[in-house]
Image: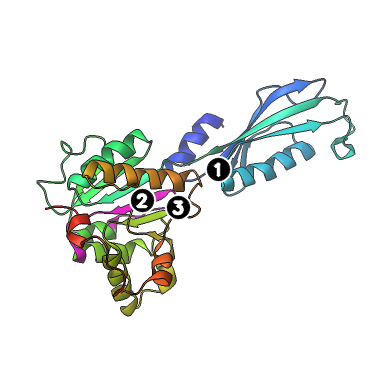
Amino acid sequence: MDIYEQIVELRRQGRRGAVATIVNVRGSIPSFKTAKMLVRDDGSIVGTIGGGCVEADVWQAAREVMESEKPRTLKFDLNQDPKYDTGLVCGGTLEVFVEPVLPPALLYVFGAGHVSINLCKVASHAGFELIVTDDRASYATKERFPAAREVHVLDFDEALAKLEPNEASYIVIVTRGHRDDMRILRWAVQTRARYVGMIGSKRKVIEISKTLQEEGVPAHLFDRVHAPIGLDIGAVTPEEIAVAITAELIAIRRHADEGLPHMSWFRSQASPAEAVDVPDAALDEDE
């Protein structure tokens, strides 16, 4: 079974894993330099780096690397540590590099106006794959979104019934109106998506959240929503807003998101009557 084919298949399925490679060897070891082992997210493995306790320790490290999404280098001294004594004529040292295998970062963009166009340009350069959805045929076109993997012209309710974001997915809601934003957010907070962000002022964010909670959507689901969307860099133009959103997406992807605002912050800081800042029309997508 080819390990590289298995890595491609794992990513195609939207799953994660970790690859362990022997990168340095001194003396005799029960394998060879460049030997590889793939550990899948279900714990199964492809390939081997020699078996025994070393492989068990690497398997455990691979599970941790999947979660942290950060590589590690492990060093083993088969001479000094008695737990690696297998009775074989092996007494060397080795280093194993363990790196994560991550699914593509897939960004679902709802809305196809000026912010979306610029967001797709910036986010694609940052390594995100894009799926754009709008209910207007003249807006949702491949010509307007050449970097998108898919462009859908669908009623939003129809689109939501077909799309299935996973843990590696990101959702950005930048439609042209409150009604569409609200029904997409209702769906988005109940998906497995890693990131959910919605454009709009603090007032709009809190009012939509309150309405959805009155409909029965559990309040805790909104805790992970980023809204107003994007890092606070004073962005005003569609181009600047696109940069701010992409920066926030990168922060989430690289686990540098500590301290970023979420809707739970707004619930604790202000009531709808107090949350007056920028007019909604200035932050919603254009027609």
Residue located beneath label 2 in the image: 232
Tell me what residue is drawn at x 64 percent, y 42 percent.
Answer: 62
Please tell me whether residue 141 belongs to the stretch shown in magenta.
no
Q: Is residue 257 visible?
A: yes
Q: Which residue is mark 3?
A: 167
The residue carrying pointer 1 sits among few (fewer than 14), some (14 to 19) or many (20 or more) residues within 10 Å by Cα, namely many
**Which callout, 1 or 3, points to the residue nearer the camera?**
1
The tag earlier along the polypeptide, 1 or 2, is 1
Q: From mark 1 to mark 3, how far is it between C-alphas?
A: 13 Å
The image position of residue 281, as x and y in percent, is 17, 59
Q: Earlier in the sequence, mark 1 or mark 3?
A: 1
Question: Is 223 left, or right, of 55 in this rendering?
Answer: left
Q: Residue furthest left?
A: 138
Q: Secondary structure at mark 2?
A: loop
Q: Is residue 14 visible?
A: no
Which three-letter amino acid code belongs to the residue tagged 2? Asp
User: Disc 3 marks which amino acid?
Assistant: Glu
The range drawn in magenta is 162-178
Who's the residue at 24% across and 60% down the image? 278
The circle drawn on residue 13 is none
Q: Residue at x 31, y 54 (%)?
A: 163
Residue type, numbered disc 1:
Glu
Name the N-terminal-most of marks 2 and 3: 3
| Separation of residues labelled 2 and 3 (CA atoms) | 25 Å
**Residue 59 placement (x, y as % from top left):** 68, 42
Q: Which residue is mark 1?
A: 69
Q: Residue at x 75, y 22 (%)?
A: 25
Q: How many marks?
A: 3
